[in-house]
Amino acid sequence: MPSLTVPERIIQPESCAQQSYTSFKQQLRTKVLSSVPTIKTSSRHMEEMMESSCKPSEATEKKRGQNRSRTPKGARTQRTPQQNGPSESDTVDKKHPEADVKPRRQDQKTTSESENQQADTTKRRRHKHHRNKQAPGGAEIGTADHLTHTASNQQQKKHSRKHLKTDTTTLPLVDDSTAPDDEGGEKQKRKKKKKQKKSRGNTEDKPGESGAVEKPNTPLKSTQAESLSPAGQTDRMDRENSRRNRGRKRCLYEDYISSKDVSDGLKRGQLIQGVLRINPKKYHEAFIPSPDGSADIFLDGMVARNRALNGDVVVVKLLPPDQWKVLNGDESEQTSVEKERQSESMPDVIVEAQYDEEEEEEELSKKMEAVTLQNKAPPTADPHSASDRNVQRTAKVVYIVEQKHSRAVSGFIKFIPDKPFTLFSPSDHRVPRVNIPLSGCPADFPSRPNDYSNTIFICRITHWPPDSLFAQGQLMKSLGQAGVIEPETDGMLIEYDVDFSEFTDEVLACLPQGRPWTIPPDELKKRRDLRKECIFTIDPATARDLDDALSCKHLPDGNFEVGVHIADVSYFIEEGSALDYTASRRATSVYLIQKVIPMLPRLLCEELCSLNPQTDRLTFSVIWTLSPEGKILSEWMGRSVIRSCVKLSYDHAQSMIDSPSKEFGADELPPVSPEHSVHTILQAVLHLHSIATHLRSQRFRGGALRLDQMKLAFTLDSGSGMPQGCYIYQYRDSNKLVEEFMLLANMAVAHQIYRSNPELALLRRHAHPQSRLMEALQEQCDHIGLNIDMSSAGALHRSLEEAVGDDEYSTARKAVLTHLCARPMQMALYFCTGVLQDEKLFHHYALNVPVYTHFTSPIRRYADVIVHRLLAASIKCGPRVHLTQDEVQKQASHCNDKKMASKRVQEMSTELFFSVFVRECGPLYSKAMVMGMLNKSFDVLVLQYGVQKRIYCNVIEDLKSFNYRKIGKRPEMTLVWNPNELDEGTVTQEISLFSVVDVRLTAGEGPLKYTAVLMRPTQS
């Protein structure tokens, strides 16, 4: 029998007999809804009450199967609206104000009794069990209109949950967590609450009909509770509050504001929009750029990010000044390095035997709050009194404008016993862990979870509830074993949303169908015929997509006719076609160590558009008449047709530059067209080199800047594809030759398309570096004695060249300085000229030119395809571009995103192959140069391989002690090594910026981890 006491004064047995169960149930619900607003009950318990009230015979049958039932101490008889004055039970309650609930051993009556009989029965039951141990039971709360009842015994509640639905939208709630459990103590309570939390949900208490709004954690009140002493009331309220909080999951993240509020806030300057960047090593740190170009705005912790992921376009609201981040020198550095160590080594907080999502989330939430509060300005601090460099503005995300992150990530799954889900741990710490339905995992995963411990899976986040630190998602596919090149590569590509699928039949149908393809005669008539000119390509030896060629002819007057010839890809891509759409979505080719993910089908990028030797090809040409010093005397642009006479590599061109008088034999060069001699090609290369040298010198004198960072290249086994060796790629004069003429062509085309279509031109701009970071770098250089002028791009370039010196480590020193100077630099971006009103914003900082674009690589960049179309329209050799200003800007933004993703994937591919190389061929030994210092660690640039690693002093073997200090603001560190059998005493080693040390690279514990170990110095 249910333990719910039938409210006899409302429910009469004869009334149940007169009407159907359904109609009476509706009447009872109406009575409950019209009750006093301070009385609340959960819909589940209301359904239980109605079940027991409307089915007395059924309740009686249930009663016979139970050993005991319970009634609360101080229970009162429900009064009808016609009754006046207090009932006997009210008087009894005031005489016995105890809040404890006592058990009873007497069946409840299901037929109507008189009010006095009911009161007497209640008193007898209470007196009989007054000395018994407190046990779980119901607690009746009476009002003038109705009676509600809280949790009964655990078995019946489970039964009720199976058969009754919860209506949380129409009934006010009462928290049933105030009822103690049957016999299990606190542990049993927690288990029961966890089982109930999904059915109970996170529905908030609603105000009653009178309009009074109650606080969520305000305990329920009754006339019984009102009669308690103040101490007793407080004790009971604390218990009820504690139980209520345990039964609910608090919202960790704020709801997003409306799009209208976003629009209004942006217009009023109260909100700021930007792209979110999350620190890959310290996932709790995130930033968005400041609109005024000052220091980035800091977002501290996951709560501040509010479920936004790296790359998302977000709207943030600045926090009050007393919550801004204080940058206070050594203390912040120490905190930073400690956080980084924690983030790199933080294990998953999972106890396999007794995993509890709610408890873990609460624990992680506390950790997040602790991290968030570490570097905040105290409430009494006045951030405005400090300089801008000592205080950084903080903010929180209030809206996600666009989810740029793909929401797909690679990682590993972990089995959680007794749970209907498993936990997905992403490899990228910037992405939250994800709850995955167990039904979406491999069928044998629950029985053999260890078989999948090293398997890489791809998970896509589908939802992130506001009350959970963990997102929800689905497994997309299994890639293979961790540490294997191809599965790891596929994971990178999927994470960064790189489309590496095969081109569809619809796309392939857009390609020329005849083989071999030849240029239509009508097309030849429209173009300038350059097939008899000495034109050649210079590319990497392994390149197959040859999209640029050069020509140079010495004129009788001593000047030169120099041409840049670019593959006319736009001829083959009809605007608006399936091929055009696919190319626009891919936006760029992605160059990995072992392969290329092409933007276009290989028929185009390797055959029809590639400027292969001794083959007629359609091109766009820019031809100048130049003086020997590189001064432009005339310029022509138009569509053309060429026939390259030879495919040179950078090595071939460099050999010609290095040995200008050498007679190259036929076996030293690739096949050359019979119409042109090797000597003619040699002279053209040398003339181009001479002019390029002048152009380069003029550019840097005019204020240009170039920051070359070390690039690692690999030799691969032809069969297995595994790395056999690696080396630093050398940027030589042959590379500079090609670069200068590509820059010259890009600048010329930028001026042309902007002049002809100032509202629709697609250009590329490069903003000035972040001022605060540049100032900090300037101060750092001053303290270590480096005379670096950062007033302009040109001044920075000149001072870098002078500061590195000319000893054996000058190249390494330049690499370290380049790395330091690259930190404040911003990314160059594509944009549509119509969206920026101020032409000063078009400026390209590094090149120091007013306008610039990309024209020279249409096979691998979609932005160049648009530029080709704009150029053709501007010189009347092509149709008008059917794009609006907004469409050009949207495509420009997409190209920016894809370019950054491509850059990151290429970097990750290099890291992958080098990790495999260390694992297969290590340990590796090399000199390294110190490039940054913290109080317990320092960063080094490994000179032989160009990789950067951090060395932690507290894990160096044989190190006795280390001492970090600052002389002024110049960091230094003293390392004291323990004596060994060859040393008479300890060895002291001094470390500072640009110090050269010996390191050993060794494979780490993970499949793709490797560490840099500081080697013991050979002398004091």
Image (tube, rainbow, N blue to C red):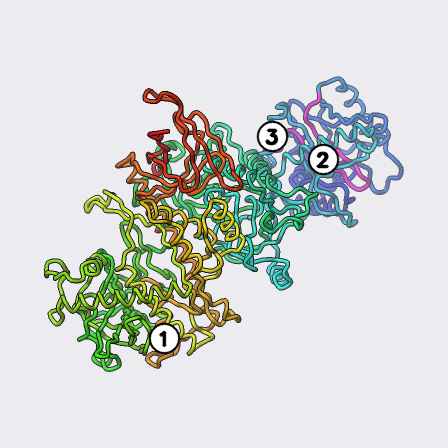
Please say if the residues under marks 1 and 2 sit with CB atoms less than 8 Å apart: no
Query: Residues under labels 1 and 2: Cα distance?
Result: 79 Å
Q: Is residue 265 visible?
A: yes
Q: What residue does disc 3 label?
A: 190
368 to the left or right of 53 = left
Amino acid type at mark 3: Arg
Check if mark 2's residue and mark 3's residue have beta carbons within 8 Å: no
Pick the residue in front: 58 or 225: 225
Disc 2/disc 3 C-alpha distance (Å): 21 Å
Disc 2 element: strand
Q: Is residue 36 left or right of residue 947?
A: right
Q: Please name the residue shown 37% across and 33% down the image.
A: 1014
Q: Is residue 881 left or right of residue 971?
A: left
Q: Residues within 10 Å of mark 1 (few under 14, many from 20)?
A: many
Q: Is residue 601 above or below residue 14?
A: below
Say which element carries label 3: helix
Give the label, 1 or 3, closer to the camera. 1
The residue identified by callout 1 is 871
Image disc number at residue 852: none
Does label 2 or label 3 sit earlier along the sequence? 2
Specify the farthest residue to the right: 85
Q: Which residue appears at 34% of the width and 78% of the height?
A: 878
Q: Amino acid at mark 1?
A: Leu
**Is disc 1 placed on a helix, strand or loop?**
helix
Mark 1 vs 3, N-terminal side? 3
Q: Earlier in the sequence, mark 1 or mark 2?
A: 2
Residue range in magenta is: 134-158
